[in-house]
Image (cartoon, helix red, strand yellow):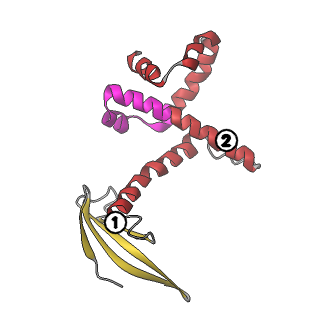
Amino acid sequence: MSELSTIGKTQTGELFEQRVQIQYGDRILSCRRVLLKLFKPTRNGDCEIAILSNLPEADARACTIVKLYQKRWRIETLFQTITTNFNGEINTLAYPKAALFSYCMAIIAYNILATLKAALGSVHGVGKIAAGLSDFYEVDEIQGTYRGMMIAIPVQEWQPFQTCSLPQMAKWLQTKP
């Protein structure tokens, strides 16, 4: 419907946009094709990212669409970690409510993992933690250690953490060896 027009540059590449139509049978969908020509190829060798959007330009500019698309990997990685490391999908749970509860518990466990990574990153640097810490082995270690802690550490030792504020907990996590 329109030629590819230059929008500008982002931190990761040059941004273009054009109006397109997609026809399926007797239906026609008008959309925008947002194209990001990357300055540096992705790890898979892709040099361009093309996104089709039916959002009006007044609601979402091309640069907003690209930024949101690039952030989606964090969400996809989160769900992949939950599914594979926290048993978020248990095949034997035939009841939808039980499966949903199991997945919610896995999301809570992931939040604990993210808190641990943030604490480690604040002390050792986010890049070092992101590059050298395996989610799988971290979860495995936590699961094994938890069972031992519940045996070795009396319940009253955990009680101060129930009323601990977020800044207090962050400080405690950063200062413990």
Q: State left or right for residue 28 relative to residue 96.
A: left
Question: Which residue range is magenta in the image?
Answer: 113-138
Residue located 77% across and 49% down the image: 95
Question: Badge 2: how crowded within 10 Å, few (<14), some, or many (20+)?
Answer: some
Magenta region includes residue 11 = no
Question: Badge 1: how crowded within 10 Å, few (<14), some, or many (20+)?
Answer: many
- Which residue is labeled 1 in the image? 62
Viewer-nearest of labels 2 and 1?
1
Q: State left or right for residue 29 relative to residue 93.
A: left
State the mark number for residue 102: 2
Is 164 located above or below residue 122 in the figure?
Answer: above
- Splitting the image into 4 quarters, where does residue 70 fall? bottom left
**Nearer to me, 91 or 28:** 28
Indicate the amino acid at tag 1. Ala
Residue located 52% across and 28% down the image: 141
For the residues bearing labels 2 and 1, Cβ distance under 8 angstroms: no
Q: State left or right for residue 19 relative to residue 101.
A: left
Is 6 located above or below residue 78 in the figure?
Answer: below
Q: Position of residue 77 (x, y in %)?
A: 47, 48
Visible residue check, residue 135: yes
Q: Position of residue 57 (x, y in %)?
A: 38, 69
Query: Element at badge 2?
Result: helix
Query: Element at badge 1?
Result: helix
> In terms of sequence position, does the residue under pointer 2 or pointer 1 come before the other?
1
Helix, strand or loop: magenta stretch:
helix
User: Marks 2 and 1, how far apart in space?
Assistant: 38 Å
**Nearer to me, 147 or 39:** 39
**Nearer to me, 75 or 19:** 19
